[in-house]
Amino acid sequence: MFKEFFDKLRNGLEKTKSNLTGRITDMLSRAVTIDEELYDELEEILITADIGVETTVYIIDRLKEKIKEDKIKDPNLLNDCLKKIIIDILGEEENSIVPKQIPEIILVIGVNGVGKTTSIGKICYKLKDRGYKVIMAAADTFRAAAIDQLEVWSERAGVEIIKHQEGSDPAAVVFDAIQASKARKADVLICDTAGRLHNKKNLMKELEKINRVIEREYKEAFKQIFLVLDATTGQNAVQQAKQFTEVCPVDGIILTKLDGTAKGGIVISIKHSLNIPVKLIGVGEGIDDLQEFKSRDFVEALF
């Protein structure tokens, strides 16, 4: 089972691997000494893999310290140093979507087009497969077809959906979903929400209203907010995450479409810049291709 997951992860990271670690290995095989020219080339590789300027500078500084401390002279030993530094940034924590306590309510936020609805469907499938009773709430009532799309996923995942008409009050949908969750003794309630980041004021008001409903009606539930980001947008995803954290607290990131991009370095950038854990990563189109993020596996698959 682990080998199957690891192979899927490694295959999903193929584009990032050739853009990042493939180029680093190639550079180090040609290097004779560890000098400023080598650091400059390494910096360029890290930035083009979308690790970001701030995180790249941090990695290079840490690398220089490590080389000095360990008196490293052979450029080929730099790969292992880099691996350790990246694992330090990402942390050793193994993320899991297993509920921390029951009942749990998860609000899923993110702009349109990042794979929010698909991610919700795949999370529901994962949880149901593990024996949890899950209900989903279609509280993104503004986007045309968002409710229909979620309904298709509720059928695929085999979980119940609570929905209203398009254009309804999202907080009213969440209210009804909470009552249904209590009545049916659901373990997890997952709520889709609208992603209108271009109008932060409206989004903030909407989320505040939803939060008030949860606080009043479902105090006993453990609450988490997950932000969905599209890995193919690179550093734009980091900017999006910064903007969303101004609107509400974010407990974890779901990073989609990692298999379709050479910009997988974004995972490192997000953790270093925002200190928000990446909870799940999308490494394929299949219903079970949304994987729980384990930093050590991620780094091993990259290197």
Image (tube, rainbow, N blue to C red):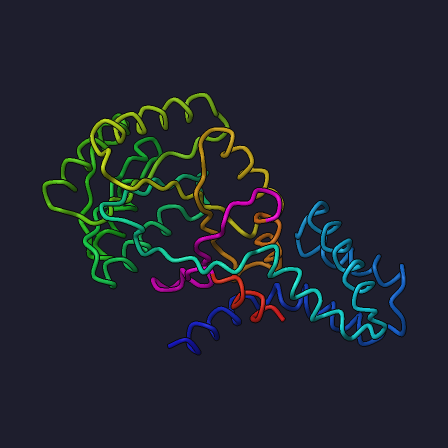
- Is 90 included in the stretch rendered in magenta? no
Furthest residue in direction front, as rendered:
69
Residue drawn at (86%, 72%), measured in percent from left and top? 73
First to last magenta residue range: 272-293
Percent from the top left, x then y, of residue 80? Answer: 69, 71
In the image, residue 107 sits, relative to residue 154, either above or below, namely: above
Residue 67 sits in quarter: bottom right
- Is 280 included in the stretch rendered in magenta? yes
Percent from the top left, x then y, of residue 244? Answer: 49, 34
Residue 167 sits in quarter: top left
Towards the viewer: 59 or 17: 59
Residue 235 sits in quarter: top right
Apparent side of residue 293 relative to residue 235 in the rendered image (left or right)? left
Apparent side of residue 208 relative to residue 84 in the rendered image (left or right)? left
In the image, residue 192 sits, relative to residue 206, either above or below, namely: below
Residue drawn at (44%, 78%), measured in percent from left and top? 3
Number of marks in the image?
0
Percent from the top left, x then y, of residue 20? Answer: 68, 64
Apparent side of residue 82 relative to residue 295 in the rendered image (left or right)? right
Furthest residue in direction left, as rendered:
183
Residue drawn at (62%, 60%), measured in percent from left and top? 262
Which quadrant is home to the N terminus? bottom left
Which quadrant is home to the C terminus? bottom right
Percent from the top left, x then y, of residue 175? Answer: 20, 31
